[in-house]
Image: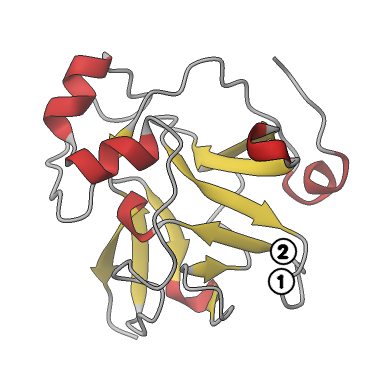
Amino acid sequence: MKILLVAILAVFGFVLITSEMNGVTAEETAVVCTETCGGLTLTEEEWRERLSPEAFRILREHGTERPFTGKYWNHKGTGVFACVGCETPLFSSENKFDSGTGWPSFTKAVSDEVVGTRVDRSHGMVRTEVHCATCKGHLGHIFRDGPPPTRLRYCINSVAIVFQERDS
Ligand SMILES: [Zn+2]
């Protein structure tokens, strides 16, 4: 299903088709990237082997971790947060802000190409779901109550990302 996200589109310029989203869970999953990374497509069984049960629930089954329970909501390090499913760098600490929500929050991704979005009508709400463009793993949702300049809030599950420290 292809859906136009009018305002999000204006900023990020593209829409992704996600007909299939299984799960990826990874909290302490130190996923070793293999030759399959980059346009990564795995079976559900392969994802289950690759990810922790929690990461599978979030990434492949669109789960959400409880607020203030993840390892990154209050994380202050300088570096990049990569997809736990495929190690693609997704968010920079430069764009991380304290949203008070209990989930790691960012004003934007490292580039427009690394994430995709689609409309999520689950749980009686209409939200914009955001996922990794490479492995299609569910990351979280985007809301319009973020700080300038984007005014967007990428609300991301800690379990879906892994921090890679960089010198500031
Ligand atoms: Zn990924």
* Residue 20 is at least partly visible in this image: yes
Q: Amino acid at mark 2?
A: Leu
Secondary structure found at label 1: loop
Give the number of the disc on residue 146: 1
The quadrant the N terminus occupies is top right
| Residue 37 locus on image (x, y percent) | 26, 30
| Residue 7 locus on image (x, y percent) | 86, 48
Q: Is residue 32 left or right of residue 95?
A: left
| Residue 53 locus on image (x, y percent) | 19, 39
Q: Which residue is painted at 25% across and 45% down in the image?
A: 54
| Residue 117 locus on image (x, y percent) | 64, 37
Q: CA distance from mark 2 to mark 1?
A: 4 Å
Total numbered labels placed on residues in the image: 2
Give the number of the disc on residue 133: none
Q: Which residue is painted at 44% across and 30% down in the image?
A: 136
Q: Amino acid at mark 1?
A: Gly
Looking at the image, is mark 2 or mark 1 earlier in the sequence?
A: 1
Which residue is at the front of the view, 27 or 110? 27
* Within-10-Å neighbours for mark 2: few <14, some 14–19, many 20+: some
Q: Which residue is painted at 31% across and 54% down in the image?
A: 159
- Residue 130 position by quadrant: top right
Secondary structure found at label 2: loop
Q: Which residue is painted at 33% across and 66% down in the image?
A: 70
Q: Is residue 159 left or right of residue 154?
A: left
The quadrant the C terminus occupies is bottom left
Residue behind mark 2: 152
Circles 2 and 1, Cβ within 8 Å, touching? The answer is yes
Residue 153 drawn above or below residue 128: below
